[in-house]
Amino acid sequence: SDSRSLQHLPDGRWIQNTERRTDAGGYVGVRTDVTELKRVQEELTRQRDVQTATLETADLGIAAFDGAHRLVTYNKRFTEIFGFGHAVLHDEPTLEKLAADVDARLDHADPDIVRASVWVDRLTSGKPVQGEMKSADGKFYDVLSNPTPDGGFVLTLANVTEHRDAAKVLQEA
């Protein structure tokens, strides 16, 4: 059986110690300097933490879909805009599944609300998309989608309700 340990030396280096018992009853030990690997891991963790903080503090709904239209990352604001629960979001749902969930909860009597399924073809066209949508809670969002190299896209939604209301007041004045 192998025994592994990681040791941080006073000079800043990281050493991985691996010991294995031999068939003859002895031990073989290997010491590997993993300082560079540890540095890269720490940098990747730092970058992930910065990206997560950026996504979660943005006042935008943000979601990324891969080339198969599966949701691969999103922020809390995205889930709030559409009212998605954990049951809908687990296991990388497709855009089509998410659109069907939204459509099932829409007030179809409201002429300003466009069915989410209408957006699927536009968003998966491989071209940038810009438009406006009204959510079930009556708020309006500027929708931007940009394709990614893998055939997917990144979707952002910005609440423009106050801007629309202010423009409407100015128009009526």
Image (cartoon, helix red, strand yellow):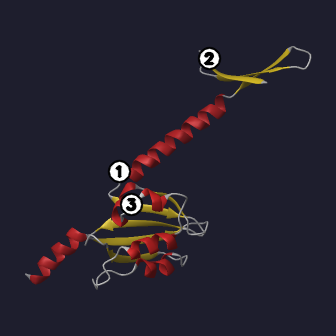
Can you tell which quarter of the image residue 6 is in? top right
Q: Determine which of the numbered discs, if any, sits on residue 9 in the image.
A: 2
Answer above or below: position of 96 versus 40. Answer: below
Q: Nearer the viewer, mark 1 or mark 2?
A: 1
Horizontally, residue 87 falls left or right of residue 166, namely: right
Percent of width and height locating residue 105: 36, 73
Question: Which residue appears farthest toward the left when viewing the image?
Answer: 173
Whether label 3 touches label 2, CB < 8 Å = no
Which one is in front, 100 or 40?
Answer: 100
Q: Residue at x 23, y 70 (%)?
A: 161
Which of the two discs, 1 and 2, labels the residue nearer the N terminus? 2
The amino acid on which the numbered mark 2 sits, given as a three-letter code, is: Leu
Which of the labelled discs sits on residue 20, or is there none? none
Label 2, residues with CA under 10 Å away: few <14, some 14-19, many ≥20: few
Label 1 SS:
helix
Q: Select label 3 or label 2 by which is in front.
A: 3
Q: Which residue corresponds to mark 1?
A: 57
- Residue at the spot x=14%, y=82% of the render? 171
Image quarter hosting the N terminus:
top right
Q: Residue at x 37, y 77 (%)?
A: 131
| Amino acid type assigned to the residue bearing label 3 in the image | Thr
Label 2 SS: loop
Location of residue 44 in the rendering, given as x and y in whole percent from the top left corner: 56, 41
- Residue 81 sits in quarter: bottom left
For the residues labelled 1 and 3, the Cα–Cα distance comes to: 14 Å
Q: Given the image, on which type of amino acid does mark 1 rest?
A: Thr
Question: Residue at the right extreme?
Answer: 24
Q: Which mark is residue 79?
A: 3
Of residues 135 and 45, the one nearer the viewer is 135
Question: How far apart are labels 3 and 2 at the CA level?
Answer: 45 Å
Q: Secondary structure at mark 3?
A: helix
Contact? badges 1 and 2 (CB < 8 Å):
no
